[in-house]
Amino acid sequence: MTSAAIPDIVISRLPVYLRALTRMLGDGQEVTSSKDLGEHLGISSAQIRKDLSHFGEFGKQGTGYQIRFLVDQLRRILKVEKEWDVALVGAGAIGHALAHYNGFRDRGFRISMIFDKDPSKIGTLINGFEVQNVSRLSDVIPQRGITLAMLAVPAEAAQAVANELIKAGVRGILSYAPINISVPEGIHVQQIDPVVHLQRITYYV
Amino acid sequence: MTSAAIPDIVISRLPVYLRALTRMLGDGQEVTSSKDLGEHLGISSAQIRKDLSHFGEFGKQGTGYQIRFLVDQLRRILKVEKEWDVALVGAGAIGHALAHYNGFRDRGFRISMIFDKDPSKIGTLINGFEVQNVSRLSDVIPQRGITLAMLAVPAEAAQAVANELIKAGVRGILSYAPINISVPEGIHVQQIDPVVHLQRITYYV
DNA sequence: TAGATTGTTAATCGATTAACAATC
DNA sequence: TAGATTGTTAATCGATTAACAATC
C-alpha cells in the first residue's frame, strides 16, 4: 500500500508560502508562525499548519518556524533546490517578456532554449540565446533532457506544439495560449490566460 | 433574506467554459452538451450542469445547449458583454507584452491607459498609447472612471501602486508582480506569477 | 513558570458525483 | 416512439476549521 496522495490544492499553495517566506527572509525576518504567515497571505493559521503537516514537522511549539529551515524544506518538497532547464517556445511579445524576466533565477528555473517558427526570428539572439527553428525541437529537447517547457505561441498552434513537446520528453508545460490544452495522463499543464483572470474579477466588480 | 452567494470556485470556472464555447463557435459548432464540453475540458458533465444551474436553465433535455445562446449568457453573467477599460501600470517587458496582446479585444477588455515612472518611457507611445507618469494616476483614473487595472511593476513597488490604484477607484487588479498584494474587503485581486505555476508542476515531475 | 504555538483530531462545512425523473 | 440529455436531489467525498493536548 502506497501512502495517501497529497491533495493538489495543498500542493498549489506551497509555492505561495515559499514566495512569502522568501520575502520575509529578504526583509531580515528569521522566525514566523502559522498565524503570522496566515495574516500575511489571508489564509487561516490552521490551514497552513495542516498543509505543512502532510510533509513533516517543521515548527516548534511556542516559537513557530525558523524561516530559513522552512524555506529549505519547501524547496526540497517542490524540487526547486536546483535549477530546472526550461524550453521556451514562441518568441513573440510574451516569449520576449519571459526570456527577459529576471524572476526565474533563484526560484528554480532557467530558460535554456528558445524556439520559434518565424524565419525572420530564427538565428537572432534573445537575452543571449539563439532562437532555434521549432522543427529542431524534437531533436534538441531530448538531447538536453529537458522536461519543462513554456508555451507562448498563438492559440491555433498551441495544441500541436504541446504534442511535439510531449513526444520530445517534456512532462510539464506552462501555457500562455488562450486555449485549453489536452494532454495524456502523467503530463502536467498550468495555463495562464490574463483574460480568464480578468473575467474572474469582473463578475464581482 | 438575500439569495445564496455563488461559490467562488464556480465563478472561476465560467471564464474557462466561455473560452471553450467561443472556440467551438469559431470552429463552426452550434450545439454542445455538458458531456461534450466536459470531455473537451477534462471536467465531469455533472459539474458543468451544476455550475450552470446556479444561474438559470440554459439547455434543452435531449439536445443540449445552443452554444451561441450559452456564450451570450456567460458573457452577461461575467459582465463582459461590453468592453472594460483597463489601466496598465508598468511599461517594462511584461507591460509591453500586455499592451501588444491582441487577445483582449472581443473578450471584454481594452487597455486604455499606460503608466510608468521611468522618465525615459514617459511620453513614448506603446501600441498607440502615450505612457503617462504614474504620479498622474490618481488624477486620470477617477477622471475616466476606470475600475480595472493590470499591475506589471517590480515586486518592491507593487503594494504601493496597488494602494494608489484603489484610492483612485480601482476595484479589481490583475497583478503580475511576484508578491502577495494585500487589499481591503471588496477589492478583487488575481495574481499571475509564472514561477508559482512552474513550481506547481515540478512537484509532480 | 506562564504564555505561545505547534501538530493533530474531530467536527463542520462545502463541493463533487451519481442517479434519475422530466422532457426534448 | 426511443434515445439523449437536462436540471436537480441526495449521497458521497474532500477540505477547512475549531479545539486542545503537548511542549517549547
Image (tube, coloured by chain):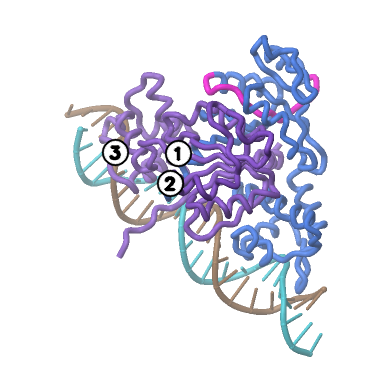
Chain colours: A purple, B blue, C brown, D cyan
From the viewer's perspective, tell me whether residue A39 is left or right of residue B129: left
Q: Mark 3 or mark 1: name the one nearer the start of the chain.
A: 3
**Percent x, y for residue B155?**
53, 23
**Mark whose residue sits in front, 2 or 3:** 2
Q: Mark 1 points at which residue?
A: A85
Looking at the rendered structure, the kind of residue marked 2 is: Gly
Q: In this view, does B159 lie above or below A33?
A: above
Q: Does the magenta stretch include residue B150?
A: yes
**Mark whose residue sits in front, 1 or 2:** 2
Helix, strand or loop under label 1: strand
Q: How many labels does the image show?
A: 3
**Percent x, y for residue B102?**
75, 37
**Percent x, y for residue A148?**
48, 44
Q: Name the residue under label 3.
A: A58
- Give the CA separation, mark 3 to mark 1: 29 Å
From the viewer's perspective, tell me whether residue C11 is left or right of residue A3: right
Q: Give the range drawn in magenta.
A: B143-156
- Residue B131 visible (yes or no): yes
Q: Do labels 1 and 2 share a chain?
A: yes
Q: Do labels 3 and 1 share a chain?
A: yes
Q: Name the residue under label 2.
A: A145
- Give the CA separation, mark 1 to mark 2: 9 Å
Q: Does the magenta stretch include residue A152?
A: no
From the viewer's perspective, tell me whether residue B65 is left or right of residue B90: right
